[in-house]
Image (cartoon, grey):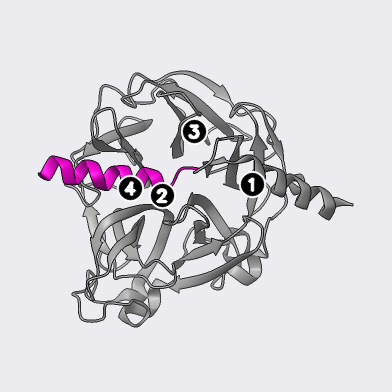
Amino acid sequence: MKLFKLFTTAMMTMVAFSAFAKTYGYLYCHMSGRGEWTAFALSRDGENWHDLNDGNEVYDTEKLSAIEGGARDAYIARDASGKGFVMVTTDMKVAKSKQWYNYGINLLRSDDLIHWEAVTFDFRKGPSIFCDPQSSDVYKDYSAIHRVWAPQVIWDADYVWDNGERGGYFIYYSLLNAKEDGYDRMFYSYADRSFTRLTKPRLLFDWGYATIDADINYLPTDGLFHMMIKKEGGTRGIFTTKSAKLTGPWPEPDEKDYVKFEGNRKCEGASAFQLEGDSTWRIAYVEYSSRPAKYRICKADKYMSNFHSPTDIKGVANPQHGSFLKLTKKEYKRLEKYWSKKKK
């Protein structure tokens, strides 16, 4: 019964985040390497890309990033109905603040990938911004939060709210509280179907050293959730770990099978995706030791292991930390038409 429940939950998660019609192409949604805004690129085959809007912002970043006016680390997915879209970004603008601190995240939603609305959560404000004030707090002083980095989202069909409503967006991110943390750790919250309400942060795992940029996907090949992640210190590379549940437990990564072919160069921002009809995986990531930084995509088998064949992304002028989404023909053509008209 437990195995059936896990399988059902995972399959509902997959359905919610896959195109209901035939895949026509792919969207690469990413932070621009030229600035702190979200840009789009399209591809028919998932390998050869072209920028939309010349790589400029695809929504009003200043308006929809209410804390600092900048957006980093964009992660996009289909909403729970499969008809709309959700996006999460790091609200941050180093060009403005001149420091690698930030204080919150943005939750965006759209019906058409063109028109977006958003809510922003400034974690420094503490319990008052969250929708579960009765629950316990992970911090005594939220005002000391100095980093809320790289949020990502996956639908959890089995999550149950206090009112009995089932289903929530599992949003996971790293946090650093300058007074209460020794290093960045991974946390999670749940957002409701409206994508406007968020629960208090809960610790996802603590491995005893800094961890950022997690990317979680469900694999039907083994019935487990797989996480790609950057861990600070020790061996460099993108690592993987597995869990039967989104909330864990998440064991420390496999130190033998990881994205290691960048050698001593630094890597982060992993994002795994599959091409239509292919059971194997593509793992995209930023190699940021080089100048300019490189955005690389390697291959992995159907178990998200045995990494090989790294190449630079093709056709994107300023790629950076981002994510990938399958598109129908209608969605693909609508984006192309809209941004072509905007250029004229």
Q: Distance between the residues labelled 3 and 2?
A: 22 Å
List the residue tagged with mark 4: 12
Residue type (three-letter) at the residue carrying disc 2:
Ala
N-terminal label among 1 and 2: 2
Instruction: Tell me the magenta residue range.
Output: 1-19
Are the residues tagged 2 and 4 within 8 Å (C-beta)?
yes
Instruction: From the image, state whether disc 3 or disc 1 is nearer to you.
Output: 1
Task: Identify which residue is drawn at 30% across, 79% down.
Answer: 127
Q: Distance between the residues labelled 3 and 1?
A: 23 Å
Task: Identify which residue is drawn at 49% across, 33% down.
Answer: 284
Q: Horizontally, is 153 left or right of 3 in the view?
A: right
Q: How far apart are marks 4 and 3 (CA)?
A: 25 Å
- The x, y position of residue 209, in whole percent, is 25, 46
List the residue tagged with mark 1: 331
Residue type (three-letter) at the residue carrying disc 3:
Ala
Q: Distance between the residues labelled 1 and 2?
A: 16 Å
Dot 4: within a 10 Å radius of its alpha carbon, few (fewer than 14), some, or many (20 or more) residues? some
- Can residue 184 be seen by looking at this rendering? no
- Can residue 308 be seen by looking at this rendering? yes
N-terminal label among 3 and 2: 2
List the residue tagged with mark 2: 16
What SS does tag 4 mark? Answer: helix
Task: Identify which residue is drawn at 25% across, 60% down.
Answer: 159
87 is higher (above) or lower (below) than 266: below
